[in-house]
Image (spheres, rainbow, N blue to C red):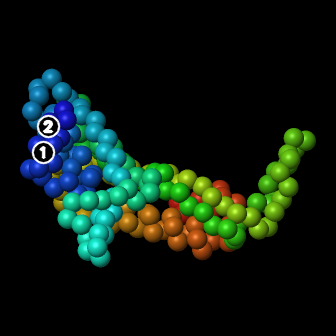
Amino acid sequence: QKQTTYILAKQNPISPPELFGSILAQHYIDKYDHIHAAHVKIIQHRWTRMVVDGKPHPHSFYRDGEEIREVEVVARDEKAGGGITVKSGINKLLVLKSTGSAFYGFNKCDYTILPETWDRILSTEIECGWLWKTCSGLQEVKFRAAAFDEAWKAAREITLNTFANDNSASVQNTMYKMCDQ
């Protein structure tokens, strides 16, 4: 499987990862009669090219945080219902703001020990995901390829902007506003 992935990555576009995952999954159900559904999960780490002596280095990079882009693809042949399903997401996106967050108005019981507060620090790890409409096959995934990167960029921008700009009543309230957008 590893060698197949390397060869297909050399022969096909690897960006967006939703397209490459679909190419890889489709390969297995097309190539092997006994495989009726192929599941592919791709995790893309953030890498930044190193600058050495004031110039971008041709082959050296550093890991730019723990944030990852995740893709899960399932390709099915006609015996298994056909089509390609794609789930995209962002995970391990660490954010922090030193003010502009509150926690008040929540239900209390005999065991509540947290006091209400109207100004606090807020730091959290964000995970979000979205499921795309099932594609009829690889051609439809290729047709939609640009939308995968656009949606990922928009989701990330909405998430970061809402987190930073919202005078949050609670982390749950800010999360709701992110999802609503």
At 35% from the left edge and 58% from the top edge, which residue is drawn? Answer: 62
Mark 1 residue element: helix
Extreme residue in the bottom direction: 54
In the rendered image, residue 93, in percent from the top left (x then y), is placed at: 49, 56
Left or right for 31, reference 164 = left
Q: Nearer the viewer, residue 141 or 81?
A: 141
Tag 1: residue type?
A: Leu
Q: Nearer the viewer, residue 11 or 65?
A: 65
At 11% from the left edge and 43% from the top edge, which residue is drawn? Answer: 7
Q: Nearer the viewer, residue 88 or 144?
A: 88
> Local crowd at mark 1 within 10 Å, few (<14), some, or many (≥20)?
some
At 37% from the left edge and 61% from the top edge, which residue is drawn? Answer: 152
Q: How many marks?
A: 2
Task: Tell me if label 2 and label 1 are in contact, CB under 8 Å.
Answer: yes
Mark 2 residue element: helix
> Local crowd at mark 2 within 10 Å, few (<14), some, or many (≥20)?
few
Q: CA distance from mark 2 to mark 1?
A: 6 Å
Left or right for 99, reference 39 = right
Tag 2: residue type?
A: Thr
In the rendered image, residue 179, in percent from the top left (x then y), is placed at: 53, 60
In the rendered structure, find residue 101 and report the number of the disc placed on it.
Answer: none
In which quarter of the view is residue 118 placed? bottom right
Q: What residue did someone put label 1 on?
A: 8
Q: What residue did someone put label 2 on?
A: 4
Residue 148 makes an appearance in the image: no
Extreme residue in the right direction: 110
Extreme residue in the front direction: 53
In the rendered image, residue 110, in percent from the top left (x then y), is placed at: 91, 41
Quadrant of the rendering where the N terminus is positioned:
top left
Residue 112 makes an appearance in the image: yes
At 60% from the left edge and 55% from the top edge, which residue is drawn? Answer: 124
Left or right for 105, reference 28 = right
